[in-house]
Image (cartoon, rainbow, N blue to C red):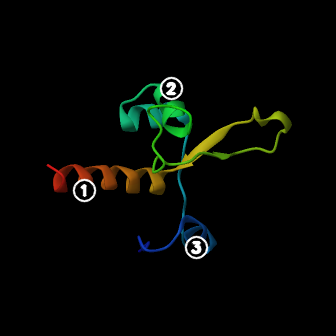
Amino acid sequence: METTSTSNTPAQQAANPSYHARILRRKQIEEAFGISRSTIYARLDPKSKQYDPDFPKPFPLSKTSGGTGAIGWLESECQAYIAHLVTTSRTSA
């Protein structure tokens, strides 16, 4: 039986041989959060009015020059963000 601790950072989890990270692609992020592609990138852009410093950050899936390679998000970070949104909405209501 696999167990993961929510107190571990993604790097600590990845170092655990029994941890299996799931990577989400942009379309999966759109579906999971119910937001558009442009909203995803607006939440990641510090210059945007929609910027959210807590929004999960993507990481490169391949090493290419120019920053045009594939990116992904860790599912665990996305789940933690959703839990944070739910907790925040319920305590501030």
Q: Position of residue 57 (x, y in %)?
A: 56, 48
The residue lying at 51 percent from left, 24 percent from top is 38
Q: Position of residue 91 (x, y in %)?
A: 18, 56
Which is more foreground, mark 2 or mark 3? 2
Q: Is residue 69 above or below residue 9?
A: above
Which is more foreground, mark 3 or mark 1? 1
Q: Where's the N terminus, which quadrant?
A: bottom left
Provide the secondary structure element on which disc 1 rests: helix
Provide the secondary structure element on which disc 2 rests: helix
Which is more foreground, mark 1 or mark 2? 1
Which numbered disc, 1 or 2, marks the residue that appears first in the sequence? 2
User: Which one is nearer the viewer's eye here, 69 or 55?
Assistant: 55
Mark 3: amino acid: Gln
The residue lying at 55 percent from left, 47 percent from top is 73
The residue lying at 18 percent from left, 52 percent from top is 92
Q: Which mark is residue 37?
A: 2
User: Which one is nearer the viewer's eye here, 58 or 91?
Assistant: 91
Q: Is residue 62 above or below residue 20?
A: above
Which numbered disc, 2 or 3, marks the residue that appears first in the sequence? 3
Q: Which residue is mark 1?
A: 87
Counting every numbered tag in the picture gives: 3
Quote the CA–CA distance across marks 3 and 1: 24 Å
Confirm or deny contact between disc 3 and disc 1 (CB under 8 A).
no
Mark 2: amino acid: Arg
Provide the secondary structure element on which disc 3 rests: helix
Q: Is residue 54 above or below residue 6?
A: above
Q: Which residue is mark 3?
A: 12
User: Which residue of the protein is positioned furthest toward the right in this rendering?
Assistant: 65
Quote the CA–CA distance across marks 1 and 2: 25 Å
| Residue 24 as seen in the image, left or right of residue 91 | right
Which numbered disc, 3 or 1, marks the residue that appears first in the sequence? 3
